[in-house]
Amino acid sequence: MRLFALLTLLCAALLAGCGASAPQVTVNDPWVRAAVTTGMNAQGGMAEATPMMGHGGMMSSGGTSAAYMVLVNRGGTADRLVSASTDVAEMVELHESKMVDNVMQMAPVAGGISVPANGQVELKPGGLHVMLIGLKRDLAAGETVRLNLTFERAGTISIDAPVRMP
Ligand SMILES: [Cu+2]
């Protein structure tokens, strides 16, 4: 049958495109920090151009949150998380938090987040994270948030990350 032949061709093409050096990225233990929107972000006027203080956890989130996870690369070629998106935030950026003069600051990671060959990178509070800016609604512990993670080589991986208190 023609359909069967077509499927066989398709499978062959897929297998051929999946050589030994192709990166295989998986996302382990994803979670999103619970957050309450303040209602002040409706205009989307948050100043994001300069590094901001954040992730204190003790103050109101101001309509932002962050996603954390472990990116595991079982392939022999390094990959890179280059962008991310979600329905629950206006904007998503890849950030890194650092202590500067005893103040926690964060800034976008230039070029994305590298995932080494046969290795992993951990996104965690106080370090690398996926920043959700301009939350469209509250994020309550127990619900899940769909995240679309786009890698340079592995393409886009969509995951459902549970929302937790930090
Ligand atoms: Cu951030």
Image: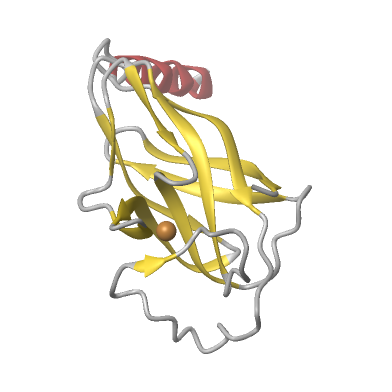
Asked if residue 1 lies left or right of residue 92, the reply is right
Question: Where residue 25 sits: x, y (%)?
Answer: 40, 26
Task: Kindly identify the residue that appears in the image at 60 percent across and 64 percent down.
Answer: 88
Q: Is residue 165 above or below residue 52?
A: above
**Residue nearest the observer in this picture, 7 or 130:** 130
Task: Kindly identify the residue that appears in the image at 27 percent across and 40 percent down.
Answer: 152
Name the residue at the top extreme: 20
Image quarter where ligand 1 lies: bottom left
Task: Kindly identify the residue that appears in the image at 27 percent across and 10 percent down.
Answer: 20
Q: Is residue 166 above or below residue 73?
A: below
Question: Where residue 146 sits: x, y (%)?
Answer: 61, 50
Residue 151, image quadrant: top left
Residue 159, image quadrant: top right
Colour scheme: secondary structure
Asked if residue 51 lies left or right of residue 125, the reply is left
Name the residue at the front extreme: 102
Count the numbered circles shown.
0
Task: Kindly identify the residue that appears in the image at 44 percent across and 51 percent down.
Answer: 130
Name the residue at the bottom extreme: 43
Question: Where residue 134 sits: x, y (%)?
Answer: 52, 73
Name the residue at the right extreme: 142
Question: Where residue 98 sits: x, y (%)?
Answer: 33, 51
Q: Is residue 165 above or below residue 54?
A: above
